[in-house]
Amino acid sequence: MTKELVDKELLKIIACPICRNELKVSGNSLKCTNKKCGETYPVKEGIPILLPPELRKELM
Ligand SMILES: [Zn+2]
């Protein structure tokens, strides 16, 4: 039994906070599908942390 990192329906509605492109699951994180952006976002207990890197550092 495999558990999805992020709910599929949630994945459909969220977007990269920097460039607004779709995100895809990449290992234990989400990765922006825009090659020019390519930002990755951590997922904590199924909740994607969609913050730009500079803000994330302050919170984590
Ligand atoms: Zn992006």
Image (spheres, rainbow, N blue to C red):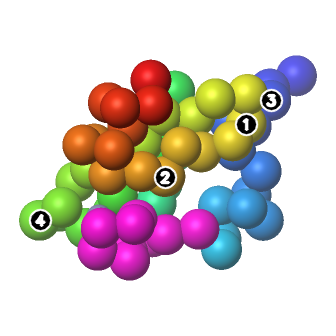
Q: Which residues are magenta?
A: 14-22
Callout in the foreground (2, 3): 2
Q: Is residue 27 visible?
A: no
**Circle 2 crowding by C-alpha within 10 Å: few under 14, some 14–19, many from 20:** some
Overall secondary structure of the magenta section: loop
Residue at 33%, 44% (x, y): give it: 55
Distance from label 2 to label 3 (Cα)?
21 Å
Q: Is the shortest distance between ligand 1 and the CB of mark 2 under 8 Å?
A: no
Q: Which residue is the site of mark 1?
A: 46
- Amino acid type assigned to the residue bearing label 1 in the image: Gly
Q: Is the shortest distance between ligand 1 and the CB of mark 4 under 8 Å?
A: yes
Distance from label 1 to label 2 (Cα)?
12 Å
Q: Out of 1 and 27, give the one closest to the viewer.
A: 27
**Residue, far left:** 36
Q: Which residue is the site of mark 2?
A: 50
Distance from label 4 to label 1 (Cα)?
26 Å
Quadrant of the image where one finds ligand 1: bottom left
Q: Earlier in the sequence, mark 2 or mark 3?
A: 3
Q: Which residue is the site of mark 4?
A: 36
